[in-house]
């Protein structure tokens, strides 16, 4: 046993972490009647993958035309245009269903999932490429061009829209919990 560690506090910390993890994962389990406990978590997770696909398509279809349009421009301008235009188009497409969704927390939760997936991807790739500096540099260049702008813009915009909705309809913003 190392000096300075308190086994009681360590055990309490382990119990808290285990309880939090069990609480999180229990949201994905089924109830007795076969329904998911937290549809918001499940639906927002699935929707985040749809949004990722929207952004991939936006970048895939817009990068070549933007490259042709910006030929001869300074490199910084080309990079900025190649980041912002697909981000704005993808975000506009992702926010089209906002008025249709009754559950207004769905889009902000989807962008939170995207943020968490981006962080997990970044950490994983940096760990996997720790012995390959050139590959790591290329990955970081790609990652910084394609990921932060859509995720941050989507998080900010969805937070603003949800906040505006919450201010106008405070009782409808958080649905009442059923007591069983």
Image (tube, rainbow, N blue to C red):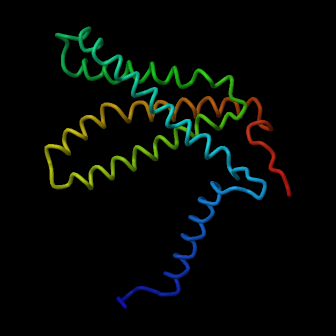
Horizontal side of 80 relative to 93 (left or right) equals: left
Looking at the rendering, in which quadrant would you find the C terminus?
A: bottom right
Residue at image point 62% right, 40% down: 43
**Number of numbered discs overlaid on the protein picture:** 0
Residue 10 in the image: state x and y as whole percent: 49, 81
Residue plotted at (34% across, 16% down):
62
Q: Is residue 18 left or right of residue 148?
A: right
Q: In the image, is residue 74 above or below residue 126? A: above
Left or right, residue 83 beside residue 180:
left
Q: Residue furthest right?
A: 180
Question: Looking at the picture, how far across and down is residue 167, in whole percent?
Answer: 72, 32
Closer to us: 63 or 77? 63
Q: Position of residue 168 (x, y in %)?
A: 75, 29
Q: Residue at x 34, y 22 (%)?
A: 60
Front in this rendered view, residue 68 or 159: 68
> Is 148 above or below relative to 136?
above
Q: Could you say where residue 175 lies in the image, as x and y percent from the top left?
A: 77, 42
Q: Quadrant of the N terminus?
A: bottom left
Picture layout, residue 119 above or below residue 141: below
User: Residue 74 occupies which quadrant of the picture?
Assistant: top left
- Which residue is rendered at x = 56% and y = 64% of the image? 21
């Amino acid at each position: 046993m190392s000096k300075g560690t308190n086994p009681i506090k360590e055990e309490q910390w382990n119990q808290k972490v285990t309880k939090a993890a069990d609480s999180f994962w229990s949201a994905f389990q089924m109830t007795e009647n076969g329904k998911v406990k937290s549809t918001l978590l499940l639906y927002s997770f699935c929707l985040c993958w749809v949004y990722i696909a929207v952004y991939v398509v936006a970048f895939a279809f817009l990068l070549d035309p933007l490259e042709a349009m910006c030929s001869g421009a300074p490199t910084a301008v080309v990079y900025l245009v190649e980041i912002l235009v697909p981000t704005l188009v993808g975000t506009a497409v992702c926010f089209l269903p906002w008025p249709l969704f009754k559950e207004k927390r769905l889009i902000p939760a989807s962008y939170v999932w995207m943020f968490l997936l981006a962080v997990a991807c970044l950490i994983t790739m940096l760990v996997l490429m720790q012995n390959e500096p050139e590959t790591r540099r290329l990955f970081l260049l790609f990652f910084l061009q394609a990921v932060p702008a859509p995720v941050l813009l989507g998080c900010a915009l969805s937070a603003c829209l949800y906040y505006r909705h919450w201010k106008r309809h405070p009782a409808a913003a958080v649905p009442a919990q059923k007591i069983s």
